[in-house]
């Protein structure tokens, strides 16, 4: 049922979580985003990985004529989204098995 509003970024969430998993396996460290107070911007290796993969992912997303929805509102949108995602992943990891 369509309730209106902006479409969800489900494909991007899957992409970002998959990249976070790959980053953690490859580096042995949790994926994370930092806020650079001096330059007033988000930064970090994981953000750079996502930014490097996005052009290809968007091109592939256009193939079925359904473009990949990516956070773009405001200059901090991508960094803020990834910061929220990685913070939630860290909380889930630190909570341990239930």
Image (spheres, helix red, strand yellow):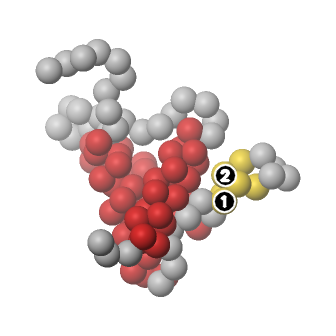
Relative to 31, does residue 58 appear above or below in the rendering?
above
For label 1, the SS is strand
Pick out the residue farthest to the front: 98
> Where in the figure is residue 65, as x and y percent of width and height?
21, 32
Labelled disc at residue 84: none
> Where in the figure is residue 38, as x and y percent of width and height?
85, 53
Relative to 74, does residue 84 appear above or below in the rendering?
below
**Residue at 55 percent of width and 53 percent of height:** 83
**Residue at 48 percent of width and 66 percent of height:** 90
Nearest the eye: 44 or 90: 90
* Residue 62, visible in the rendered structure: yes
Nearest the eye: 96 or 45: 96
Q: Residues within 10 Å of mark 1 (few under 14, many from 20)?
A: some
> Where in the figure is residue 22, as x and y percent of width and height?
37, 72
* Mark 1 and mark 2 residues within 8 Å of each other at the beta carbon: yes
Give the quarter of the image for residue 96: bottom left
Q: Quadrant of the C terminus?
A: bottom left
Relative to 8, does residue 18 appear above or below in the rendering?
below
* Residue 50, visible in the rendered structure: no
Pick out the residue farthest to the left: 1
Cα–Cα span, label 1 and label 2: 6 Å
Q: How many tags in the picture? A: 2
Query: What residue does disc 1 label?
Result: 34
**Residue at 47 percent of width and 84 percent of height:** 28
Query: What residue does disc 2 label?
Result: 42
Pick out the residue farthest to the top: 4
Pick out the residue farthest to the bottom: 28
Give the quarter of the image for residue 34: bottom right
Q: Quadrant of the N terminus?
A: top left
Give the quarter of the image for residue 6: top left
Q: Earlier in the sequence, mark 1 or mark 2?
A: 1
**Residue at 37 percent of width and 70 percent of height:** 21
């Amino acid at each position: 049922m369509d309730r209106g509003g902006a479409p969800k970024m489900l494909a991007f969430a899957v992409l970002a979580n998959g990249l976070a998993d790959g980053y953690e396996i490859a580096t042995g460290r949790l994926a994370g985003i930092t806020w650079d107070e001096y330059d007033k911007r988000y930064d970090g290796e994981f953000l750079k990985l996502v930014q490097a993969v996005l052009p290809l992912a968007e091109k592939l997303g256009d193939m079925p004529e359904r473009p990949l929805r990516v956070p773009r509102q405001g200059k901090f949108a991508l960094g803020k989204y990834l910061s929220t995602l990685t913070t939630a992943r860290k909380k889930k990891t630190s909570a341990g098995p239930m």
